[in-house]
Amino acid sequence: MKRWLVGVLFANFVLTAAIPEGVGSDSVSRKDRIKGAIMGVFVGDALGVGSHWYYDLEKLKKDFGPWISDYNDPKPNGSGRFASVHEYRYKQGIRAGHASQTGQLYTMLLESIVKNGTYEQGDFAARVDELFETLDGTSYSGLYTDQAIRETWNHRNEGIGWDQLEVGSNAITSEAAQMNVALAALYFDDPARLAKEANRNTKLFYHNDFTITHSVSYALVVGGLINGVPLEDIKKYIGSVDRETMAGYARYFDSRIQVETGAIAWNSEITFDPPHLIAKVYGQHCEIQQLLPAAYYLIHRYSDDFEKAVLAAINGGGNNMARSALTGGMIGAMVGLSGIPERFITGLNDHERLLALAEKVATLTEN
C-alpha cells in the first residue's frame, strides 16, 4: 500500500526496494568525479539564479512555464514575493547562466586552491576582503548579498579578525556548504583532513555549531562520493572517521548521518510524486536543515541522472538555487563531468575558465 511521505523526516527505514543500478558505480573515473562535483555546484547555482525564491509554485510556473529545464534570466517584473531581488539582479547584469554571489565566492576559493596547490585560508580570506570592499553591507549590493555574508561583512568592518570565531554569522544557511565542495575535491581521500579544512572554511562565514556541523558533513558526503564510495555506504564511510576527531569538527552526530534519510527514495512502500515537491515536505526556505534533506532525497531518487536531480531541486521553488547547487555537487560527484548534459556546461557564463579551474584542481590530486 502506498503512503505519502509526511512527518517521517528523520526516521530510519528498511529498504524494501532494490538500490538503483549505477549507485556507487566504479565506471566513472575519480578525476571525472572531481570535475563533475565542482561543475555540478556551478550548474545548480546558475540554474536557480533566475528563478530564486519563488515560494508559490503557481507563480513560478506563471513566470517560467510549467517546467524549468534550463538557465533563465531573472525577471525584471516578476510575480513572485521577491520580485525586487530579481529586478535588482537583472539591473546588475545577471543573465541566464550567470553565478550568484555564492557562486562568485566559490570561484574565488577554487582560484585560491589552484594558485596555492592546497587550501590556504589566509589567501582565500584576503580574496574575500577584496570582494567585501565592493559591498556596502546591505542586501542590495554586489550580486545580492545574503545574510551570512552581510553579517560577516559587518564583523570584518568592526575589526573582528578572520582568526576569531565571532567573525562569522549566526545564520543557518548553506553558502559555506556549497563552497566546501572545492575542499571535498581536494581532500576526498583523507576524510579527517577534509573535516578539518571544511570546518575551518565554514568558520569564516558562520559561528553557529549547527551550521558548521551540517556544512562539514555535506563536504564529507561529497568527498566520499568522489572517492567512489557507494551511496548506500556513505553513512558508514563518515562513521569510519575517529569519533573524537569528528566531534571536534562536526559536533552533532545526527547531522553527520543525515544523508541516510535520502534512502527513503528506495523504499517501495513510500512514494512521493512528483519528486520536486519533496521541497514542500522538508521546507522551501534557506535553512540548511531544510535544504540538505531534500538534496539527499534527490540524489537517492535520481542516483544516475544529473539532469533529473537538479531540475527537481529547481522546480521545487523557494531557495531552489541553494538546493540545486547542493544537489549538483553530490550528483556531479556520482556521474562525473561526463554525466552532466553539455548544454548545462556550455550555457554557464565563462564556462571555459570554470572548466579549466576544475581541471587544475583535479590535476592537483594526481600529484
Image: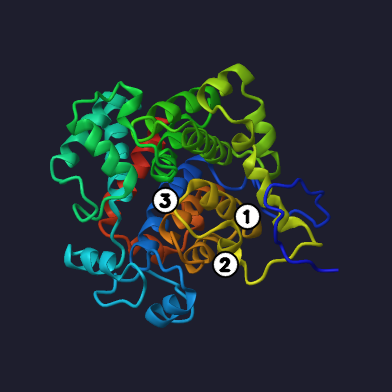
- Residue 331 visible, this orientation: no
Dot 2 and dot 1 residues touching (CB under 8 Å): no
> Mark 2 = which residue?
276
> Mark 1 = which residue?
297
**Mark 2 is on which residue type?**
His
Which-is-in-front pick, marks 3 and 1?
1
Placement of 291 over or under 362, stated as above or below: below
Instruction: Find numbered disc 1 in the image and state the secondary structure of the residue it sits on.
Output: helix
Indicate which disc, 2 or 3, sits on the residue closer to the N terminus: 3
> Mark 3 = which residue?
41
Q: Quadrant of residue 168?
A: top left
Dot 2 and dot 3 residues touching (CB under 8 Å): no
Q: Position of residue 347 (x, y in %)?
A: 33, 65
Check the image and name the residue furthest to the right.
Answer: 1
* CA separation in Å, label 2 and label 3: 18 Å
Q: Quadrant of residue 199?
A: top left
From the viewer's side, name the closer residue of 30 and 302.
Answer: 302
- Left or right position of 7 against 323: right
